[in-house]
Amino acid sequence: MPTSKPNNHNRNCADATLECGGLAPLCYRSRRLEAKAAPGRRTPKWCLIVLLLICSATIVAQTRKPRPKPQTPQTQPTAEADFARFVKLADDARVAERFDDAISLYGQALKIKPKWPDGWWYIGAIFYQRDLYPDAQNAFQNLVALEPERGPAWAMLGLCQFQTNEFERAAISLERGRSLGVSDNSELANVVRYHIALLYVRFDYFENAYEVLNEFVRMGQETPKVVEAFGLTILRMPFLPKEVPSDQREKLLIAGQAGYHMAARRLEQARAAFDMLLTRYPNDPNIHYAFGVFMLPQDADLAMNEFKRELQISPAHYAAMAQMAFEYLKRDQFNDALPLAEKAVQLAPKLYAARNVLGRVLLELGQVDRSIKELEEGVKLAPSSPEMHFALARAYTRAGRKEEAARERQTFKKLQDEYNQKRQLDKSGDPPEQKP
Amino acid sequence: MNGFLKQYSLIAVAFVLCLVTFVIVINAQMTAVQRWNPRRVPADTVFVGDQACGECHKKMFASHGQSGMAMAMEPVAGSQVLGANPKLSLRVGPYTYEIKRNGKQSTYSVTDGNETVTFPIVYAFGQGKMGQTYVLEREGKFYESLVSFYNEPKSLDFTIGAPRGVPTSLTAAIGRLLSPNEVASCFSCHSTGAVVTGSQLRLDKLAHGVRCEACHGPGGRHIAAVKEGDTPSKSIFNPGLLGGDELTQHFCASCHRGAEEFSSLQSLELNNVRFQPYRIFHSKCYSDDRNISCTACHNPHEPLREEPGYYDKRCLECHSLRDKKAKAGDGNFCPVADKNCTSCHMPKIEMKAAHFKFTDHYIRIVRPGEKYPN
């Protein structure tokens, strides 16, 4: 995040990348330059900006479209010549790290050709790096209006919105950037991923945050920032890292280690971190729940006891209720599962997992119509969740609604194929299979 | 004319009565014992044992006894694999593995040259057609043996999924410590009656392999109903009445792994060729139709049929022969052959780690050189 200041640059590079809000190679390269430069001759901030622009230029080059041809009176020969002159001067100023001049000159060029996408990119990137987020946001807003399919532009817009605390908008822009593709620039992709995870945390979507953070695990990026984000997720603290009270930080970091190890399937290390959490904070909320989730695939009985303990500490813990309901469902104890699933839905009507388990329990109890209603609601809440479609297909089959069942099965297949393709792309970082 | 109408009416009434009776019988069967899941055995379940089933169902009892499912776990005393291979050994780095037969007992030992650990083999998983893995027990903890017997080379090799390197210690060389869930998972699919309410073990009740009651549920009520002259079908679960998708993706898949469970697995390698419900789910012709369910092709009461021609009649329930419908562009028509459909459309995939070729249940037109579709 742009709270990043020069004195932060002696940190772990990948971590700094995340904090710089977008432009990882900048931080990395700036550290190298810093090491080479004589003290005081060039500040890391300057290095950052230089590299930002190099990076920006790279991104622009990757996504550049032909510059618009002259179409209006502005593009008459004189205007065209002026435009070319301003662009040249702006580029020179940028390369020479005269950023105030560069902003002014790009601004002049954009006055002549307001539909010049690369101009908005350059000027937005410079504003962003100088922590002028509203100005940067305007620039990227103009850019996405001109090129709505340009993923990195949406990503940068989302990062600006994040900095101006427009979190809902930021989430939409970042997700859009991600879906359009920012992976040509892996550093930007990482920053986007990190901020999306933080937003999920802030919006209480901890499971989604965990999924997104898992991508860092697959890439082996065990950085302090990622661990901290895992901590927020594990402890279900809907805060940004900077908002965490200082007396909670130790707990947060231990939980983060536990979460990271859990995601990386380092079971012994995860268990050790959880044991430390349970010893130090036995009555704090969410810890028994998190430990229960960790133990569920290994020892379901122990996990169930942890969920029960969590409900003693946090009686409205809907996630613990949903987990218990799922486990009871697995054991065919539908009458035990039902009240928990119903309560979870009542407490968290937007939690698709609660709808999922309630729908499945109702189906097993023969309440097919009610089951379908819950599962349809779950599909609305999580249209990209394969298991929701799978469960709904089963319910439709049970109701004799064959065409709808076939449709849901097809959707499940499609989503699963997409998921598998994504996993194959990430596969190099996958931990080894544990099941025989 | 009147006589004709009367006769016609009688036939219609008889037909309606038959239909109503059929619906009532089917409904009664479904409402009697609607639910059974081989891996969700309630704590109070009492199994009568398959000898009791065999008293009436003699033929099925005999043929099922020869099936792969019935032999999913071998009693060590009568183990064909261990009996036929009385001394097996393997060296991995400094570790030497030895499986030795002594009368009706077998032992699994590992030594690093200085120290030796020996376990009596109590649980032998697998019929030996592909291979056999051993679950070892010590002080209440269960380990999956690091090495398994494989039938094709008739020797030991790493167990599927085990790390194929030199173990870091003698303890690690024994095998993988199994979590309670994993232990329950192993025993609930390879034996009958050993696991209840999810993960509680009761090994004293274990019957080796997948026996009658693993799929049909406890038979006590059924036997009592027969003795009392009641409708026996009401008192036992019949998976044969399940819909195609319910049977394949939920019932059989509870052990053979279906499409939904696969989502949670990590492997995208061709290891998944072992999970037939998952594979068939991806076939273009997969649906809720029972003609494409597991039991459409496989009779669970009999040993697996290996000859490709045996399955042709199943394919031909939907597809046409060339001479019957020689029309190009007909989706149901195979332009290449009239028989042995599975040999092309369900190719055998070699899984080197298993020393075995599995039939890929993803039914498809296989293109030369194509990548294994996950």
Image (tube, coloured by chain):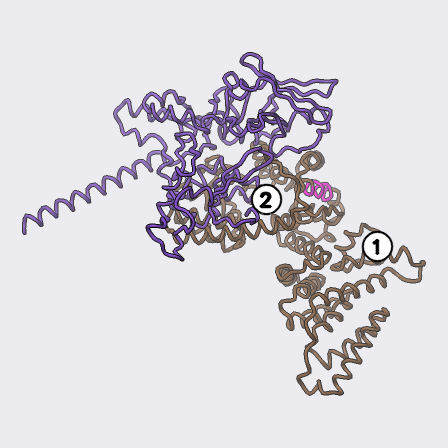
The residue stretch that appears in magenta: A251-260
Relative horizontal placement of residue A393, taking residue A209 as reference (left or right): left
Kindly identify which residue carries mark 1. Answer: A9
Q: Residue furthest left?
A: B2
Q: Residues within 10 Å of mark 1 (few under 14, many from 20)?
A: many
Q: Is the residue B185 above or below the residue A120 in the image?
A: above
Number of numbered labels in the structure image: 2
Please name the color used to draw chain B.
purple
Q: Position of residue B72 (x, y in %)?
A: 49, 27
Q: In the depicted view, which residue is nearer to us: B198 or B238? A: B238
- Residue A288, quarter of the rendered image: top right
Can residue B139 be seen?
no
- Residue B172, quarter of the rendered image: top right
Q: From the image, state whether disc 1 or disc 2 is nearer to you.
A: 2
Residue type of the residue flagged with mark 2:
Leu
Residue lying at 40% horizontally and 32% vertically, measured from the top left: B300
Can residue A43 be seen?
yes
Kindly identify which residue carries mark 2. Answer: B268
Q: Position of residue A191 (x, y in %)?
A: 71, 56
Q: Chain of mark 2?
A: B
- Residue A83, quarter of the rendered image: bottom right
Q: Chain of mark 1?
A: A
Q: Residue furthest top?
A: B103
Q: Secondary structure at mark 1?
A: loop
Residue type of the residue flagged with mark 1:
His
Q: CA distance from mark 1 to mark 2?
A: 39 Å
Please name the color used to draw chain A.
brown
Residue lying at 72% horizontally and 87% vertically, measured from the top left: A76
Residue lying at 57% horizontally and 44% vertically, measured from the top left: A319
Q: In the depicted view, which residue is nearer to us: A10 or B333? A: B333
Which SS type dominates the magenta stretch? helix
